[in-house]
Structures are given as C-alpha cells and as structure tokens.
Amino acid sequence: MGIEDLQHNFLTGRVEDLVQWARRASLWPVSFGLACCAIEMMATGGADFDLARFGMEVFRNSPRQGDLMIVAGRVSQKMAPVLRQVYDQMAEPKYVISMGVCASSGGLFNNYAIVQGVDQIVPVDVYAPGCPPSPETLMHAILTLHELIRTGEIMKRRASGTPVHLDDHGSDWTPEVPVTVRLGTPK
C-alpha cells in the first residue's frame, strides 16, 4: 500500500479538516448555570461522566477564555443583558447549547419575568431537552455540536446570516429562526 492509496494523511489532508478537528477537540465551556439544570451540568464535569475526554475538563470563569456557552436554566429578563454581554465577550468561533426546557422555551415559567427561549438573546446551536436534562443528554448535545463543527454546518449557517445584536434592533426585535438541532433524550 503506497501513499497514493491513502485518502487523507498528514501530507494529503486538508487544512480545513485539521482546523475543524482542532476546534471540536478544544472547546472550553463558560460557566453560566442559572437554575436546577446547572447541578446536572456540574455533574457532567465530574468524575462519573468525565468531560475531560472531550477536551473540556475545565469550565472557564472568564468569557474571554471560553468558546462554548452552556445556558443551563431559566433566564430572567434582568439576566438577559448579562447573558448577551458574556456572549459578546467570548472568543470567535463561539457556540451555544441551550440546556433544559426553561432555557429553550421558558418551561413552566410562562410569565413576564422569564425569557421565553434563550434564542431570543443569543443564537443557539444545539438544544438539550429535559427538566432537568441528564448528564448523558448534555454529553449527547456536546457530541452533536462536535459533529456540526466537524461537518462545517455551523460555519455555513453563520456565513449566511448577519450577527445578532440586541442594541441594533431595539424593543421590536425578534430573532431569526436558526438552523439548529433538537435532541431527544438518549437511552
């Protein structure tokens, strides 16, 4: 078997594939736990589920060091500008996982004080359902995000639209519907 028989190796591989591999193998999550889902997010980082095997062993406390925001729990109207500020301070490329039904759609808190879906504040890449979602569901969402990064789907979506900024749109702003993946709970 000669070198011409190999489809990809270190000599013939594409730089784009190498960059996508590096991006998905080095995601650093930002701590943004807001409610009961945050307990499950913390459990996912523990020894039983071990996010270190995906290169995510440390949850960053500074948005400038992270590139994956996991919004775990309900987002109040007062917390929405803070959430957006943390998102804006994150390094590019940045990704968002909406963890739990409260973050995804407001959950059972259908009132004026709770944002009815974090996708009204920041663009969401993957939704992890459940109340609260199990650590396995969060890991499934992370693996789905890894696959979207590997195939380049996220960059295609972001290249087709314009950046979302709350200040540019005023109070009548409604988000565009992102091309996202909704997950079922793994068995």
Image: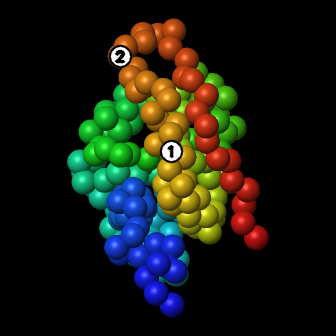
Element assignment for label 1:
helix
| Residue 168, position as x, y percentages in the image | 37, 14
55 versus 151 height, above or below:
below
Q: Residues within 10 Å of mark 1 (few under 14, many from 20)?
A: some
Question: Alpha carbon of mark 1 to alpha carbon of mark 2: how far?
Answer: 24 Å
Q: Earlier in the sequence, mark 1 or mark 2?
A: 1
Please indicate whether residue 76 sits to the left or right of residue 187 in the image.
Answer: left
Depth check: 155 or 112 in front?
Answer: 155
Q: Residue at x 73, y 56 (%)?
A: 184
**Which residue is tagged 2?**
167
What residue is drawn where x is 69% and y is 53%? 183
Residue 4 location (% of width, % of height): 47, 78
Residue type at mark 1 is: Ile
Tell me where residue 178 appears, x and y as whole percent: 58, 33
Q: Amino acid at mark 2?
A: Asp
Label 1, on which residue? 154
Q: Does 22 sit above or below residue 30?
A: below
Q: How busy is the neighbourhood of tag 2: few (under 14 within 10 Å), some, or many (20 plus)?
A: few
- As rendered, which of 117 and 11 lies closer to the eye? 11
Front in this rendered view, residue 89 or 23: 23
